[in-house]
């Protein structure tokens, strides 16, 4: 699990323990979530950094690239890695997460029946 998966897992454990406990295979879920976050961050970072301006110094480029990475991480962390806002607010559950949780629960039920 990469750093983004671990970050998300810790946030879910602290902020939304009920939703966290409903994830059947937490390691798999947060590993996949972390990988997805890393891909989105890399893509967004490139877009935010943009092309190299003419006459840009080494330190200016390092600063621009670091700023783009930090901004991309912040955006993706907020949009993808954050747990639902509150335990009571079921409307904030990501539909893709709910579909995944439902699928995993169904698969687990079928496995138990075998």
Image (spheres, grey):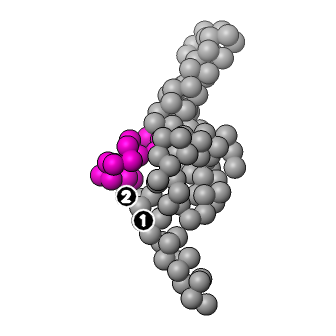
Q: Secondary structure at mark 1?
A: helix
Residue 29 part of the magenta segment: no
Q: What percent of the width, then of the height, locates residue 58?
A: 69, 12
Q: What percent of the width, then of the height, locates residue 53?
A: 55, 16
Task: Tell me whether the residue at label 2 lies in contact with that at label 1, contact meaning CB atoms closer than 8 angstroms.
Answer: yes
> From mark 2 to mark 1, how far is it between C-alphas?
6 Å
Figure disc tally: 2
Q: Secondary structure at mark 2?
A: helix
Q: Is residue 42 visible?
A: yes
Q: Is residue 6 above or below residue 104?
A: above
Foreground of the two, 56 or 2: 2
Q: Which residues are magenta?
A: 79-94
Residue 99, numbered label: 1
Foreground of the two, 78 or 104: 104
Residue under the point 53% across and 41% down: 14
Residue under the point 46% across and 54% down: 19
Residue 85 part of the magenta segment: yes
Please tell me whether the stretch drawn in magenta is mainly helix, strand or loop: loop
Residue under the point 57% across and 51% down: 33
From the viewer's perspective, tell me whether residue 3 is left or right of residue 64.
Answer: right
Q: Is residue 43 visible?
A: no
**Residue under circle 2?**
95
Crowd band around label 2 with a 10 angstrom C-alpha radius: few (<14), some (14–19), many (20+): few
Res 112 → quadrant: bottom right
Q: What percent of the width, then of the height, locates residue 18?
A: 47, 53
């Amino acid at each position: 699990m990469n750093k983004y998966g671990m970050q998300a897992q810790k946030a879910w454990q602290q902020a939304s323990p009920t939703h966290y406990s409903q994830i059947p295979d937490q390691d798999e879920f947060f590993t996949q979530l972390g990988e997805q976050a890393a891909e989105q961050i890399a893509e967004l970072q490139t877009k935010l950094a943009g092309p190299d301006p003419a006459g840009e110094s080494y330190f200016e480029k390092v600063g621009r690239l670091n700023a783009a990475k930090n901004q991309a991480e912040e955006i993706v962390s907020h949009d993808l890695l954050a747990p639902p806002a509150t335990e009571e607010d079921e409307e904030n559950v990501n539909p893709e997460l709910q579909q995944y949780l439902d699928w995993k629960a169904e698969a687990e039920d079928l496995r138990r029946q075998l």
